[in-house]
Image: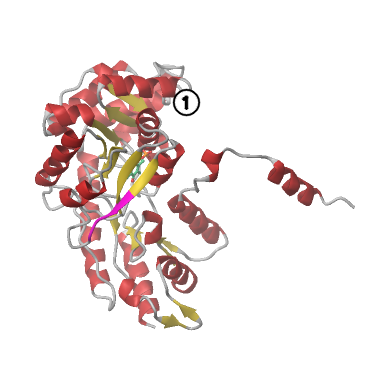
Amino acid sequence: MVNVNEELTKGLKLMKFSKRIQKIKPSMTLAITAKESAMRAKGIDIIGFGAGEPDFDTPENIKEAAVRCLKEGFTKYTPVGGIDTLKEAIIEKFKRDNGLTYNKSEIIVSCGAKHSIYNAVQALFEEGDEVIIPAPYWVSYPDIVTLSGAEPVIVETSEENGFRLRGEDLKQYITSRTKGIILNTPSNPTGGAYTKEDVEEIAAISVERGIFVISDEIYEKIVYDGFNPTSIASIDDEIKDLTVVINGVSKTYSMTGWRIGYTAAHKEIVSAMFNIQSQSTSNPVSISQKAAVEALNGSQDATAIMVEEFRKRRDYIVERLNSIEGVSCFKPLGAFYVFPNISKLYGRRYGDKIIKGSLNMADYLIQEAKVSVVPGIAFGADDFIRLSYATSMENIKRGLDRIEEAIGR
Ligand SMILES: *Cc1c(COP(=O)(O)O)cnc(C)c1O
């Protein structure tokens, strides 16, 4: 008898995938959200701290702009790099918020900021290049760099320094092969953020050594306690030429599903990204582009309300976590994640389980506390776990009660 499954598996094994693809893994954060939903579908009462997106609805004015766009029949191909009105809105945003002046040839709109980063990396890096990534890093950076053929070089940052890369550490890792660095401020997963002085220091080193900076500023508008982000591109013209600024509407306007991200960079870089995009995805969704125009030009009230709610949750969650014995938590300046250090709990035994690292802890919490968190190892920092506070205050309270109880056992 022929076992069809076995035959299929054999067939797949014979199939040879590219070396490129064999080196990368799927996004662990997306995998955890999927596992969470699967458990919930089985009727298990899971409290999810895995979310990588705001729990707010897209603001009404933005949705209305999309409906208008549909009714007007704006549903065909658009220019590959985005419609003019959106580029104009983006140019205005950079002027208003960052004091940066760009023209249309220096702007390209892509299918989400992740796509912007992907295209920028494809345009700039290749085999033989090294790209510096400070850890803890956003899950996708190392794999996106690996896909380009370049080598990610991970540089640790310390919790004591607010998870910011220091100039002296950066210098130590720069070699003749270093082609770029990927900065993320405010940071996912830590909530750490770079001050003007911090980015000045990194800008000076980057200009001196001639390395590109990809600056992922997607959480720029989700900041607390009056923190005022500085885009590294705004330091001077030299660093501006070397910087690829990445931003988007996903987080600021709760528009993760609409897939709009954008890049500002030297026109040669934008033109290279344009070529990649024109031979792969073509334009971002026409309707989403019109909605993004409204997001950038319209009322910013919904964002302010969302950020104030995030701040309340952050204050609560940081305090609760710090009151748990063996746990310490840095107070984030931005984004909607906390990144508590749980390494003091390593070596502890719970029943027949010994917690040896962040994966064990995440496993223990989902099995025993029915709470899902992301293990820090996904971000290159095994002493930590990530909790997203893009969930209701009620869930946060219940979830922390469960975590506290499970850790205290
Ligand atoms: C969410 C996120 C992105 C991707 O945003 P999309 O626009 O949804 O692709 C990029 N960088 C960081 C750090 C993020 O957290």
Q: Where is residue 86 in the image (x, y as percent from the top left)?
A: 29, 22
Give the camera-side residue of 64 and 88.
88
Can residue 36 be seen in the rendering of this structure?
yes
Question: Which residue ends up furthest to the front in the rendered image?
Answer: 176
Is 133 displayed left or right of 409 in the figure? left
Note whether 167 is above or below 360 in the view shown: above
Task: Determine the residue positioned at 47% across, 56% down.
Answer: 32
Give the magenta part as a residue range: 154-158
Numbered-mark total:
1
Tell me, yes or no, whether the highlighted magenta stretch contains residue 361. Answer: no
Place of residue 46 in the rendered image (x, y in percent of width and height, measured from the top left): 46, 64
Q: Decide: is 361 above or below 55.
A: below
Q: Is residue 189 left or right of residue 334?
A: right
Residue 63: x and y, percent?
36, 32
Quadrant in which the C terminus appears: bottom left
Q: Which residue is found at the position 31% from the left and 75% from the top?
A: 344
- Circle 1 crowding by C-alpha within 10 Å: few under 14, some 14–19, many from 20: few
Q: Quadrant of ligand 1?
A: top left
The x and y percentages for residue 18 are 57, 37
Q: Mark 1 points at which residue?
A: 281
63 in relation to 88, above or below: below
Amino acid at pointer 1 = Thr
Q: In this view, does 189 lie to the left or right of 333?
A: right
> Tag 1, which secondary structure?
loop
Q: Can residue 86 be seen?
A: no
Q: Which of 5 and 141 is in front in this view?
A: 141
Q: Is the magenta stretch mostly helix, strand or loop?
A: strand
Q: Colour scheme in the image?
A: secondary structure
Q: In which quarter of the image is residue 302?
A: top left
